[in-house]
Amino acid sequence: MNIVKDDLKGPQIKALLQEHLDDMYATSPAESVHALDIDALRHSNVEFWTAWNGECLLGCIALKALDVGHAEIKSMRTSHQARGKGVAKSLLIHLVEQAKQSGFTRLSLETGTEDYFLAARSLYLSHGFVECEPFADYVLDPNSTFMTRAL
């Protein structure tokens, strides 16, 4: 698996991100979907990586700077054909290291409360994340779980 910084211009990543948005809207009420579209992921405060096996896109993850010491995980997605193969774990480990190298001292995320998100919540818990109150511009939402960890 090769993890690279991505410019979000390739057709494969566009398709994976659209699949991600479609799943989020199919799983959660629209007002509880906080996934970023491709234009928002191109913002200067966001870094974006993709995981590949040759020409096959396996997954993606983004790091959004919230302030000088705090960043948020966004757009964590594994392609359907790569699920259960450790892609999400590898992407998360990569992102945590990148966040540390960038000088962030806290990493947070929002994910869903539905069963669909159970694997994601379990992965985050196994990597030191704990549930927390809403952060940044988030508000309490029965469809959202907020998690954080110190770096």
Image (spheres, grey):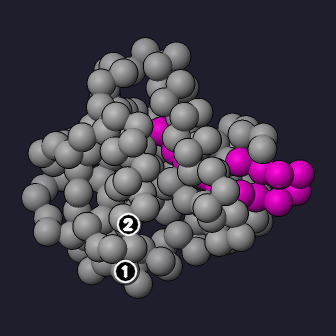
Relative to 129, 119 lies left or right: right
At x 23% / y 57%, what residue is drawn?
Answer: 145
Name the residue rendered at 41%, 84% in the picture: 26
Relative to 126, say whether 138 is above or below: below
* Magenta residues, dominant SS class: strand
Which image quadrant for residue 7? top right
Q: Is 85 or 97 nearer to us in this picture?
A: 85
User: Where is residue 28 shown, x and y percent of the image?
Assistant: 31, 77
The picture places residue 47, in percent across and down from the top left corner, at: 55, 37
Q: Is residue 113 left or right of residue 50?
A: left
Q: Residue furthest bottom?
A: 26
Mark 1 nearby-residue class (10 Å; few <14, some 14–19, many ≥20): some
Secondary structure category for the residue under label 2: helix
Position in image of residue 107 (x %, y %): 34, 33
Please, what is the three-letter code of the amino acid marked with disc 1? Answer: Thr
The boundaries of the magenta stretch are: 51-63
Left or right, 41 with reference to 107: right
Question: Which amino acid, by three-letter code, is at mark 2?
Answer: Phe
Per the rendering, the mark at residue 27 is 1
Callout 1–callout 2 Cβ contact below 8 Å: yes
Residue beneath the point at 38% across and 66% down:
117
**Residue corresponding to mark 2:** 117
Q: Residues within 10 Å of mark 2 (few under 14, many from 20)?
A: some
Label number found at residue 106:
none
Q: Secondary structure at mark 1?
A: helix
- Relative to 110, say whether 71 is above or below: above
CA–CA distance in space, label 1 to label 2: 9 Å
Q: Is residue 107 above or below residue 113?
A: above
Quarter of the figure with residue 105: top left
